[in-house]
Amino acid sequence: MYEIELKAHVLDRKSVIQNLEKFATFSGAVEKDDTYYSNKINGKSIKVRIRKETPFSTQEVPNAPQTTSQKSVIFTYKRKEILEKDGTPIEVNDEKELFLSDADAIEAFLFDTGFKTTLKKQKTVLSWQYDGANLELCHVARLGDFLEIEILSENNSEKTVSQSREKLLKMLSKCGIPEDKIENRYYSQMLGEKQETSVARH
């Protein structure tokens, strides 16, 4: 499956939640702890991610149900691409995922085959569903609040991406977020830049 998505900076978290509650269905809250690994194989940089998810009960969403979900571990290999059309950057990712009972075996395998830890990321996520899309209000440690809107597609044809782009932008507008708040950098890039800035200051 291909992920066709955008993310945008959120300046007023409470207002975005209120807008989401008007048209979308709340589907849960989860803490996502991500560890990224990288290795060079046959001259190509290969990157993978291990995500540990912990569901929680949130007080931010009115009448949100108490969670009964269990922790989960997800191994992800993702081929990333950003397409820009009419000045709007849209991510189109070919994502492969594997659900695990725990991370010990895959972490040992990565270590023994030369993969190195390149980045750790913590993200708190509130999720809604609407018209085949997943909308996530995220707080990313060290970066702030973002809204991610994602549509899953079986193909990444130009027609599919164009139609999905229009759908994403309409939902972004329904959330009260202007298009100039769309962020075209990956979180890993933003965190890396922030780390470089911090080191330079010292």
Image: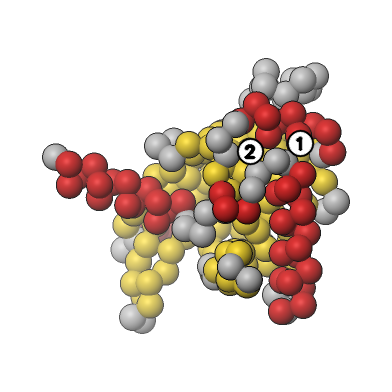
Residue located 33% across and 52% down the image: 192
**Which of the labelled discs sits on residue 20, or is there none?**
1
Q: Are marks 1 and 2 in contact (CB under 8 Å)?
A: yes
Residue located 36% across and 81% down the image: 42
Say which amino acid is labelled 2.
Answer: Leu
Say which amino acid is labelled 1.
Answer: Leu
**Which of the labelled discs sits on residue 137, or is there none?**
2
Describe residue 25's horizontal placement relative to residue 68 as left or right: right
Q: Please, what secondary structure does the residue beneath circle 1 have?
A: helix
Quarter of the picture containing the N terminus is bottom right
**Which of the labelled discs sits on residue 164, or is there none?**
none
Give above or below for 153 relative to 35: below
Q: Is residue 93 visible?
A: no
Q: Is residue 147 visible?
A: yes
* Sequence order check, earlier mark of 1 and 2: 1
Q: Please, what secondary structure does the residue beneath circle 2 have?
A: strand
Residue located 71% across and 45% down the image: 135
